[in-house]
């Protein structure tokens, strides 16, 4: 189970970090270190103190950026959402459904590459599934999921994309989700092999060469 907070013993009462520091960069460093520790040790076995010590700062400094350990986990989860958001941002820039359908196979291939480049995030999800289940009630998690789902539904309901193509597009989403993300159905297959096989499966759906 996720420990919702660790603030009871050390509330964030210290002076905030140096205002001249790049706060965005500091947040990213915290997230990168948390990603390492959550993957190495597991979410439940990693404390805010552990993250602070590896960063070389205090718990109070971390609480300046994140309210709790669960908030850090949520931000890491949303990094995966960002990969999908980029795909849909590119799609929405195209003029019509036909153009989006034409671009879809290439964009899904780019998404597979992006997931491969962020394999640490995939490993984090696979090794901490019970912790991520605790995030499902988060308002931000709901908002991000709802936004992605809305975009998928809008795309797949487009009347100017033939039904056969829309079904292939939906199947390609299933290939990526089931083959690479979170609770992958084929976790026993090594990551690099799964990436290659999912890429091949998507190419087969659209009749394209690998």
Image (cartoon, rainbow, N blue to C red):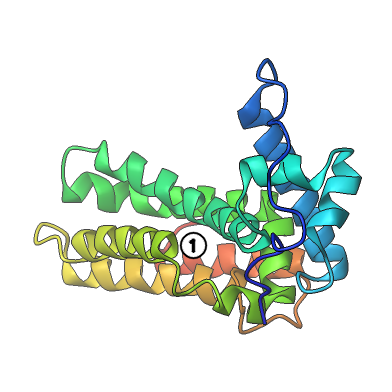
97 with respect to 171 (left or right): left
The correct choice, above or below, for 87 with respect to 9 in the image is above
Task: Name the image quarter holding residue 57.
Answer: top right
Does 180 sit left or right of 57 as displayed?
A: left
Q: Which residue is mark 1?
A: 203
**Rendered view: 155 above or below 131:** above
Give coordinates of residue 52: x percent, y percent: 83, 47
Q: Residue furthest top?
A: 20
Which of the 4 image quarters holds residue 45? bottom right
- Report how many numbered discs are placed on residues in the image: 1
Q: Residue at x 53, y 71 (%)?
A: 135
Q: At which x and y percent is residue 59?
A: 79, 48
Q: Is residue 204 above or below residue 57?
A: below
Q: Is residue 210 visible?
A: no
- Given residues 137 and 210, the one toward you in this image is 137
* x and y percentages locating residue 143 in the rendered image: 35, 60
| Outermost residue to the left | 159
């Amino acid at each position: 189970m996720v420990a919702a907070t660790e603030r009871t013993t050390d509330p964030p009462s210290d002076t905030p970090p140096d205002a001249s520091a790049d706060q965005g960069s500091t947040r990213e460093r915290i997230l990168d270190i948390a990603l390492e520790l959550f993957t190495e040790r597991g979410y439940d076995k990693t404390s805010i103190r552990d993250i602070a010590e590896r960063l070389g700062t205090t718990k109070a400094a971390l609480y300046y950026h994140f309210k709790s350990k669960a908030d850090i986990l949520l931000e890491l989860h949303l990094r995966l959402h960002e990969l999908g958001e980029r795909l849909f941002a590119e799609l929405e820039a195209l003029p019509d459904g036909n153009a989006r359908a034409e671009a879809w196979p290439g964009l899904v291939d780019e998404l597979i590459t992006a997931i491969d480049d962020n394999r640490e995030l995939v490993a984090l999800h696979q090794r901490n599934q019970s912790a991520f289940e605790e995030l499902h009630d988060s308002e931000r998690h709901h908002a991000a999921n709802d936004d992605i789902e809305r975009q998928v539904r809008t795309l797949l309901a487009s009347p100017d994309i033939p039904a056969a193509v829309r079904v292939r597009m939906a199947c390609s989403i299933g290939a990526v989700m089931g083959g690479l993300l979170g609770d992958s159905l084929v976790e026993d297959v090594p990551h690099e092999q799964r990436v290659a096989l999912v890429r091949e499966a998507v190419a087969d759906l659209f009749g394209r060469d690998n």
